[in-house]
Image (spheres, rainbow, N blue to C red):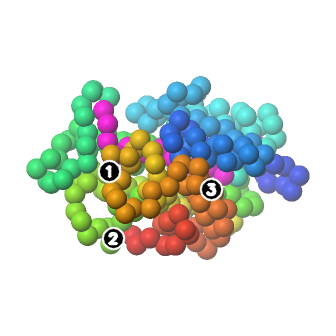
Amino acid sequence: MNHPQPHADVPGVSLLLGAGGGIGTALRQRLEERGETVIALGRHTEPALDYGDEASVAACAHHLAERLESSGQVLTRLIVATGFLHGRTPSGHLAEPERSWKNLEPEALAHSFLVNAIGPALVIKHLLPLLPRQGRCTAAFLSARVGSVGDNRLGGWYAYRAAKAALNQLVHTAAIELARRNRESVCVVLHPGTVDTGLSQPFAKTGLAVRSPDIAAAEILAVVDGLQPAQSGGFWDQHGKAVPW
């Protein structure tokens, strides 16, 4: 399938994955308020995005490719706002951030890696090839500061930390390959800060700068829009500052 290349008169399309979450919903609203074309996909959309089924990721890519071809538009922004910290696994097991190595459980580890690392790896495989070969384009994957090895001073949260660290490496590696296809591309991992969503609410401590999803979305878009190709492959926070690996 042929994909159009960027042109000044051709509006770009933003693809948002994880559209049903707190940050995802706010990102979609912000982008639409700016008059941008947004394709939002998640677990409950059509097609549905299911990281446990690679065929569903491929179907999302096919859906996007058909939309681009029929509209003559170009994918210029991809934001992956999916993530898992706590909750029920598909089998019903309750997974919580581990306080100690005594709490490590294979099922919780596997599910955290599925959502936080393996799923985004499949997004890299099936969706990054749809970015244009010429002109500016961005791919941003929401990570977390706790995925930083260098910044880990408190311990705990084994599964989430390790899975996000894996995500960081996957995206850094993908950025290198993407740059060979398009020297103007930007591919990064972003720490959105502590946001008032279902993911972070049980663990937001007094003193943390907790922001609303709407404010977080504005910050994320400002960082994504401001990053330059020389910064591709990096790990950045909500203020555009580098986070240690």
Look at mark 3 in the image and give the residue it sits on. 218
Can residue 86 be seen here?
A: yes
Q: Is residue 75 above or below residue 41?
A: below
Q: Residue furthest left?
A: 102
Q: In the image, what residue occupies the spot 38% across and 48% down?
A: 200
* Amino acid at circle 3: Ala
**Disc 3 to disc 2, C-alpha distance:** 25 Å
* Amino acid at circle 2: Asp
| Coordinates of residue 239 in the picture (x, y in percent) | 55, 68
Q: In the image, what residue occupies the spot 86% across and 56% down?
A: 8
| Front disc: 1 or 2 | 1
Image quadrant in which the N terminus is located: top right
Stretch in magenta? 77-88
The numbered mark, 3 or 1, whose residue comes first in the sequence reads 1
Q: Secondary structure at mark 2?
A: loop
Q: In the image, what residue occupies the spot 55% across and 55% down?
A: 216
Q: Is residue 95 above or below residue 149?
A: above
206 or 160, nearer to the observer: 206
Please indicate whether residue 157 sits to the left or right of residue 175 in the image: left
Image mark for residue 170: none
230 or 173, nearer to the observer: 230
Please indicate whether residue 236 sits to the left or right of residue 100 in the image: right
Look at mark 2 in the image and give the residue it sits on. 151
**Disc 1 to disc 2, C-alpha distance:** 18 Å
Image quadrant in which the C terminus is located: bottom left
| Coordinates of residue 63 in the picture (x, y in percent) | 65, 32
Q: Is residue 224 above or below residue 126?
A: below
Q: Secondary structure at mark 3?
A: helix
Image mark for residue 203: 1
Can residue 166 be seen here?
A: no
Q: Is residue 28 above or below residue 190?
A: above
